[in-house]
Image (cartoon, rainbow, N blue to C red):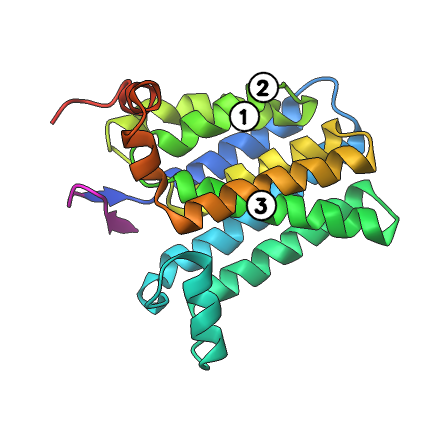
Amino acid sequence: MRRVNHAGAEVSLLGGPALVALAGAGTLLAPGLSRRARAASIVALLGGGAAGLYDDVREHRHAPGKGLRGHLDALVSGNVTSGAVKAVGLAATGVGVARVLFRAPVDVFLGAAIVAGEAHLANLFDLRPGRCLKFALLRAALPPGPGSTGMSVAAATMLALDLRERTMLGDCGANALGAALGAAALVRLRSRAGRIAHLATVLSVIAAGEGRSFSDIIAADPVLSWLDAFGRPAR
């Protein structure tokens, strides 16, 4: 599988499946994780990766409009895009992750929304080499979560290849990363109020990204622009 990137170069999409495999192995081997935390992370990686992989394979069936709104508009008009199918898959992944960790319906709903929202948010950052991986590593570190160890190791391992455009994450890798971040957040957040606040933050950032490209926002800030370009070969 290959895809043309932002610079017009054809790049392998095997980075996504490779990241899912590495993160899954790291999660299984990570010490100190509870059985539920380990299972939640695996469900997030596999579910998010599978939903994204479908969108990667069926990329010719995208919506004519921009972002999530474009897929919803296409769905209303009777056009089932690959992105709409992926959204359903991410929602199902979120429910699966939340059911591993919670029993109360309200907590399952909040948990599912956080996982699906995080998966979509990570995908919004996957517009330049290394950006999504840097985002995931920073998110996992602030604050660190016990469920993010395997994902962080995999992201760090893949970063050099992604920065040098030897491979790219695609939706498979980006959605898996985001879903894993969501699962780690659910493991870390002990209170319902904390989960509500986290979901509100995620939705606010998504809304900002739907209204204006993150590339434009990053380019307008010198610090963010430097961090985004760090490690990427100059053209």
Q: Which residue is mark 2?
A: 142
Q: Is residue 126 above or below residue 88?
A: above
Where residue 52 appears, x then y in whole percent? 47, 52
Where residue 212 appears, x then y in whole percent? 37, 46
Classify 10 Å Cα crowding around label 3: few (below 14), some (14-19), many (20 and above).
Answer: some
Q: CA distance from mark 3 to mark 1?
A: 16 Å
Q: Please, what secondary structure does the residue beneath circle 2 have?
A: loop
Q: Please give the label number shown on residue 206.
A: none
* Picture residue at 74% right of the left edge, 37% below the top: 195
Tell me the kind of residue under disc 2. Answer: Leu
Tell me the kind of residue under disc 3. Answer: Leu
Per the rendered image, the range of residues in magenta is 1-9
Tell me the kind of residue under disc 1. Answer: Arg
* Picture residue at 82% right of the left edge, 51% below the top: 106
Q: Which badge, 3 or 1, is on the more N-terminal residue? A: 1
Q: Which residue is mark 3?
A: 203
Marks 2 and 1 in Cβ contact (< 8 Å)? yes
Out of 158 and 225, give the one closest to the viewer. Answer: 225
Q: Residue furthest left?
A: 235
Q: Which residue is mark 1?
A: 139
The majority secondary structure of the magenta stretch comes to loop
Dividing the picture into quarters, in which one does residue 149 lie? top right
In the shown orientation, is residue 40 left or right of residue 103? left
Q: Is residue 35 above or below residue 113?
A: above
Out of 67 and 169, give the one closest to the viewer. Answer: 67
